[in-house]
Amino acid sequence: MIDDEISGAELGKKTAAEMALTLLKDGMAVGLGSGSTAEWFVRLLGRAMAQGELRADCAATSERTALLAERCDIAIRPLDSFARLDLTVDGADEIDPALNLIKGGGGCHLIEKIVAAASDDLIVIADDRKLVDTLGVFPLPVEIATYGWETTVRMVQGLLAEADVGGRQMQRRLARGTPFLTDEGNFVIDCHLERIGDAVSLAGALNRIPGVVEHGLFLGMASRAIIGAADGSARTVFPA
Ligand code: 5RP
């Protein structure tokens, strides 16, 4: 799989993951992100560790990533066993010029945010389709408690009615026709906002709704992004 012939966006993802791997120093404590781009990083890290090129102590941001890590012979430690992580390498659904992000396309944003906040650096890896001028075309995932979920949805609706956004449609995420549940057993509401005019106030307002467990806005958290292109090149972007 790791050496299969690939092209297009997949090559961009792999190239970004390869460049991120060069930032690791031996013995670092590393958070492993979730999603198809982060999975490239896990596979490449597993190979580097198996070949004795690198040692790392790792925490995972989802059950799926933990399973992949185990298959790659990377031991996963609970986050609480680390004082801090040196860095986390994770994907994103949208990246703006300030490196504010929308994450949660895989529904892992709660754990991803906890792990990122416990890391000295959050390095985002993505292919260049993820770069945007303004966040919001990718539906914003909002993880909500199952208890009273319709009440919470009405509160989010009320908030969006007043917010500086371009659209207000909301959908509970489904998986094979049944409600999608996160690793923590919560629902996800995808908010089709089209354009988020003021991400800081939207994030703050969502945080104030008790039934909202976490949303996919990662503001001011990423220290750099590594962007891969379909031609196999990659570049590093720092917050504007
Ligand atoms: C999962 C995430 C992912 O990092 C994000 O959805 C990007 O995934 P991919 O690399 O597959 O495009 O936030 O919750």
Image: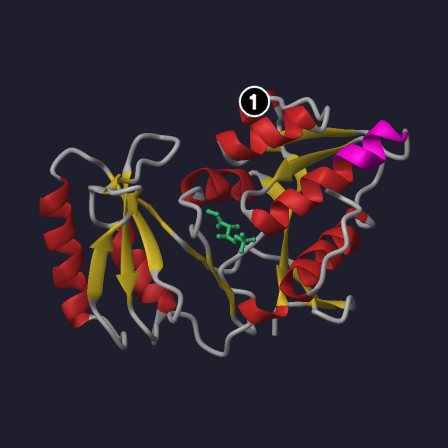
Please give the name of the residue rendered at 68% of the width and 36% of the height, measured from the top-left corner.
30
Q: Is residue 50 left or right of residue 88?
A: right
Question: Does 187 sit left or right of 111 as displayed?
Answer: left
Residue hosting label 1? 78
Whether residue 141 appears in magenta in the rendering, the answer is no
Magenta residues span: 46-51
- Give the residue at x 64% y 64%: 9
Vertical arrangement, residue 192 with respect to residue 28, above or below: below
Residue appearing at x 17%, y 62% in the figure: 159
**Residue 131 seen by the camera:** yes
Can see residue 226? no
Q: Is residue 145 left or right of residue 13?
A: left
Q: Amino acid at mark 1?
A: Pro
Q: Is residue 50 magenta?
A: yes
Residue at the image position 75 percent from the left and 58 percent from the top: 15
- State the quadrant of the N terminus: top right
For the C terminus, the quadrant is bottom right
Classified by dominant secondary structure, the portion drawn in magenta counts as: helix
* Front residue of 30 and 139: 139
